[in-house]
Image (cartoon, helix red, strand yellow):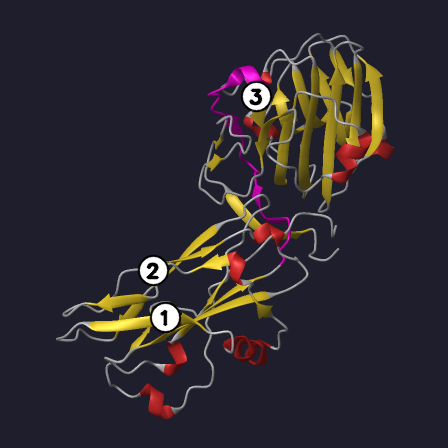
Amino acid sequence: MKHYILYAALFFMTFTFGCDNSDDDFDNKAYVSSSSKISELLVKAGVNDVEKSIQAAIAKPNNQDILVKYRVDQALVETYNMAYYDNAVMLPAENYSFPESTVTITSGNVLSKELKVLFKDLSQLDREIVYVLPITMDSEDIDVLKSDKTMYYVIKGAALINVVADIEENYLTVNWTKPDVCNNLSQLTMEALVRVRNFDRMISTVMGIEGQFLIRLGDAGFPSNQIQIATNSGNFPDGDSNKGLPTNEWVHIALTYDSSTGAMAVYVNGNKQSETIKSLGNINLGQGGTSGFCIGRSYADERYLAGEISECRIWNVVRTAEEIASNPYYVDPASEGLVAYWKFDDESALSVEDHTGNGNNAVANSTLRWTPVTLPVPGE
């Protein structure tokens, strides 16, 4: 897993370094306006640049302007390490910029304007190293609260997947702004990463179009936990109790199809599970509505997937077994042949972004539930 692209993170949590009673009196003092003094923002794969802000505040309005000066203080890296028993190093100068370093809290106000802190080329950092950027404040016009004068921006390797969608009793349709990219496909690969908690219904749906081209689990007289490809020319493969998926485990599912030969294959966790020949012609997936392409629905709402889903992809090429096995958690959104990519990491109420830039976003039938995860574990 160490060959995966760096993720970087910047977290906001409560951070107090041993203040004494003299610092907690009732005098008006300046401080960093934030409920926490550590900043972490998960930077997803392929995202190099992140913008944050820092703001000064005072407890009560002053009758004169107050000038506050910020500075990057490398000496505070050791303070951070001692407080958190960490081994962080200073973020290299080429990976950040702080364009403005002074700000004014104007007379009668308690907040300054926000200043920008820019982080650059984060994906070039070593994901095995923890980096920190301490920015602290001083003022000649007012005392500064010692315990709240510094913001620590912490950058470290993170999991490739940090949140997934729970789609039990839910489903998504696609708002096809560019349906042509998923229509008339002579070659096709479909992928999804799922964790199913139960197979209590006869059919559970992954994605596709009912009666035409669909990845589902189960059928009448067929194991409810086995992958079945339902097409307009019959279903595949035959039932086999040895091919059932486990519950409460992450499983990567892939389907490939080549219309020129009819070759169709199902992969589970990168291993070919089933194969056949089917003459289906070119495939059209860019169809909207509940009778079109859905994630987590086919024929009826009760055929939902009782679990979580991530990394749904459609390609206009046949991916090799090696490519499928090597990239369960992430692919570059600009990868050749990738025509739809729903990562399911949005944490929004209803919408899931298509990361290819084609704008074919997925829309949930009801409010999505989001589950924090760590896939894969950093360093593995």
Q: How many marks?
A: 3
The x and y percentages for residue 296 are 59, 30
Is 173 drawn above or below residue 333 in the view shown?
above
Mark 3 Cα shell of 10 Å, populated few (<14), some (14-19), many (≥20): many
The range drawn in magenta is: 157-181
Q: Name the residue under label 2.
A: 115
At label 1, the amino acid type is: Tyr
> Residue at coordinates 14% horizontally, 69% vertically from top-left?
108
Query: Of the residues under marks 1 and 2, which one precedes in the sequence?
Result: 1
Q: Mark 1 points at which residue?
A: 70
The x and y percentages for residue 158 are 62, 56
The x and y percentages for residue 35 are 39, 68
Query: Of the residues under marks 3 and 2, which one precedes in the sequence?
Result: 2
> Residue at coordinates 32% horizontally, 64% vertically from top-left?
55
| Occupied quadrant, residue 66 | bottom left
Q: How far apart are marks 3 and 1 (CA)?
A: 53 Å
Q: Can residue 81 be seen at all in this image of the molecule?
A: yes
